[in-house]
Image (cartoon, rainbow, N blue to C red):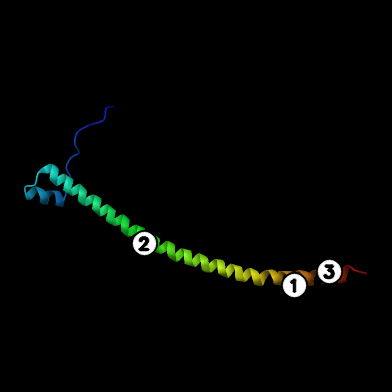
Amino acid sequence: MPASTAAPEPPVDAIYRAWRAARVDPDLAHEAVEQVRAQAGRNVIDIMESRFAAVESVMESRFDELNTEIRVLQRVIWPLIGILATTVFGLLYRTVAP
């Protein structure tokens, strides 16, 4: 099926109609509307990128906090496990030893 080379139909929205009511050339009005849409899209992208950056920053700081908490807990838990294991094995040795 051959590709169509026909120009896209002009947008039918308030901006286009306003340009046309001001007797702007249809092609120029169409280009202006497309440019407004493109700029609006860039604005949305910029806003979303800044929000993602803010969320990412918060998440990174929270992950750092969690990593610190994990390291502190590991410093406390492993010695406790060692003490508990020593006690249990000591009691087992007393029980089994003649």
What amino acid is labelled 1 in the image?
A: Ile
Q: CA distance from mark 1 to mark 3?
A: 14 Å
Give the residue at mark 2: 51
Task: Name the mark on residue 32.
Answer: none
Q: CA distance from mark 1 to mark 2?
A: 48 Å
What amino acid is labelled 3 in the image?
A: Leu
- Residue drawn 54% across the image and 67% down it: 66
- Residue drawn 78% across the image and 70% down it: 86
- Image side of residue 86 versus residue 15, left or right: right
Give the residue at mark 1: 83
Local secondary structure at mark 3? helix
Is 54 located above or below residue 25 in the figure? Answer: below
Is 75 located above or below residue 42 in the figure? Answer: below
- Give residue 39's position: percent from left, percent from top: 24, 53
Is 36 located above or below residue 89 in the figure? Answer: above
- Image side of residue 52 versus residue 1, left or right: right
Q: CA distance from mark 3 to mark 2?
A: 59 Å
What amino acid is labelled 2 in the image?
A: Arg
Local secondary structure at mark 1? helix
**Where is the C terminus found, in terms of image quarters?**
bottom right
Q: N-terminal of the two: label 1 or label 2?
A: 2
